[in-house]
Image: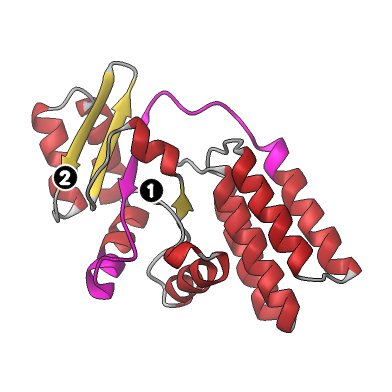
Amino acid sequence: MKTVTALTAVLLLSAHCCAAQTSATDENREFIRQQESFSQTLRKQDNAPLREMLEQQIRQNPLSENDSRFIGELKQSQRESQQEQPARGALYFVSFSIPPTGLKRMLAEARQYSIPATLRGMVKNDMKTTAEAVQALVKDGATSGVQIDPTQYRKFSITSVPSLVVFCESGHDVIRGNLHLKQALEKVVDKGECKEEARELLNQGGSK
C-alpha cells in the first residue's frame, strides 16, 4: 500500500552525511535506521538527477570508513527493494508550508491509514534543512517518515496541498482541500472510481 521514491533514500542518506560531518551519534544513526526500515515497505524509483545530488552531498562531506559502509548498505538495500509501482493504493500530498499544527495532524492521520505522506521537493531546496525538518517531526511523533516525489505531483496533476489521491486499476480519484482523511476517503467511497480501495483503507485505519 505504501510507496516511496529514490529521493526518500537520498534524503535519508544526506541526513546521515550531515550528521557524520558533525558527530555520528547513536541517536542520528538510529533515526536513519528507523527511516530506512520505514522505506523498505515503500516503492522506490530510479532518478538520475537525485542520485547525482546524493553523490555531490557525499563528496562535500568526508565520511569515515564505517559511515561509508553504512551508506553503501543503505544504497544496496534500496536497489534490492526496487519494484514496480503497485496498481492500487493512495498518496497524501502535503507541504512544509502548511502550518505546523495542521501538518502534524495530517501526518498523524496519514500514518493511521497507512498512506504515504508525499512532498514535492526539499525545504528551501536544501537537503540538510529538509532532513532536519523530517527528523523533528519523527522525534515529535507526528510521523514515521515522509517521501519526496515530484513525479507523482506531475502524474496526478497536483497543484495544491493537501490533496489525497486514491488509485486503482480503473483510474484514480483526487480529493483536494483541508479535510480529515476519513472524510476524504468517505467521499471516494461515495462517488469515486476507486471506492473499494478507499473502503479498504478506511477499514484498516479504523482498526488501529
Q: Amino acid at mark 2?
A: Arg
- Bounds of the magenta span? 78-105
The picture places residue 136, in percent across and down from the top left corner, at 46, 76
Say which label, 1 or 2, has the lower sequence index. Answer: 1
In this picture, is 132 found above or below 163?
A: below
- Residue 134 horizontal side relative to residue 189, left or right: right
Residue 13 lies, in percent from the top left, at 67, 60
Label 1 and label 2: CA atoms lie apart by 19 Å
**Quadrant that contains the N terminus:** top left
Residue found 53% across the figure and 38% down from its top: 43
* Camera sees residue 208: no
Residue drawn at the location 53% of the way across and 43% of the way down: 5
Q: Quadrant of residue 165?
A: top left
Is residue 74 shown to the viewer in this render?
Answer: yes
In the displayed structure image, the side of residue 97 where residue 17 appears, left or right = right
- Across and down, in percent, residue 144 comes to 47, 62
Residue 176 got which mark?
A: 2
Relative to 152, is 125 on the left or the right?
A: right
| Residue at 84% in and 62% down | 68
Answer with the quarter of the image where residue 189 lies.
Answer: top left
Q: Position of residue 194 (x, y in %)?
A: 23, 25
Q: Which residue is mark 1?
A: 114
Does dot 2 land on a helix, a strand or a loop?
A: strand
